[in-house]
Amino acid sequence: ADKRSKPQAALEDTVDRVVADFVKDGTLRPDEIDDGVRKLLARRSGRVAQAALAEYCSLEGRHKFHNPAAYLTKIVTRIATDEDVANKSTILNKPTKKPDRGAARRSAKKPASSSKPAASTPTERDAPPPTPASGPHSHDLAAIFS
């Protein structure tokens, strides 16, 4: 019995089709990809497989590689990592709640409050920077050395 889940089986079929297309059009030799690379691709997405194989096939002199599957594995890993980082940043930037569309209506029903400007109090930011002669660690050097 086939123990693969339906999504996993579909992904493996997609990867097999992508690899077959590259082999069929002559840009990839069958001996350049091994079972390890196929399994790695099958754990990712069709997009990763397409991008990794396209990048690998665009390399000049790849026919001279001693271990082409290792090089392809490196490309797949980098592209997959980049995609994971992009997905994570996209997820982190998504709002977690829907915007409160009733807030504008509720605030319009509130009675008008006095529109006095807030009292401005000086802060440390507003103070001028200390000069060498003033500040927490300044000393009257003339008094010390006299």
Image: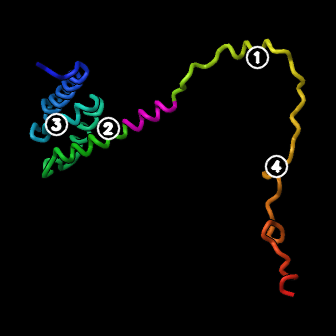
Residue 110 locus on image (x, y percent): 81, 15
Spatial distance from mark 3 to mark 1, Cα to Cα? 64 Å
Residue underneath mark 2: 80
Q: Nearer the viewer, mark 2 or mark 3?
A: 2
Q: Position of residue 30 (x, y in %)?
A: 10, 37
Residue at 13%, 37% (x, y): give it: 35
| Mark 4 or mark 1: whose residue is earlier in sequence | 1
Label 2: state its secondary structure: helix
SS under mark 3: loop
Label 1 sits on what residue type? Ser
State which tag comes first along the sequence, 2 or 3.
3
Is residue 84 in view from this perspective?
Answer: yes
The N terminus, quarter of image? top left
Q: CA distance from mark 4 to mark 1?
A: 31 Å
Which quadrant of the rendered structure holds the C terminus?
bottom right
- Badge nearest the viewer, 4 or 2: 4
Mark 3 or 1: the one toward you: 1
Task: Name the amino acid type tagged 3.
Answer: Thr
Mark 3 Cα shell of 10 Å, populated few (<14), some (14-19), many (≥20): some
- Which residue does the image show at 11% across and 38% down from the upper left? 29
Name the element at disc 1: helix
Q: Tell me if mark 2 has few (under 14), some (14-19) or many (20+) residues whose alpha carbon lies within 10 angstroms of its own.
A: many
Q: Is residue 90 left or right of residue 122?
A: left
Mark carried by residue 107: 1
Badge 1: how crowded within 10 Å, few (<14), some, or many (20+)? few
Which residue in the protein does label 3 denote?
Answer: 27
Residue at label 4?
A: 123
Disc nearer the start of the sequence (3/1): 3
Query: The magenta stretch spans which residues?
Result: 84-93
In this view, the residue in front, 123 or 34, is 123
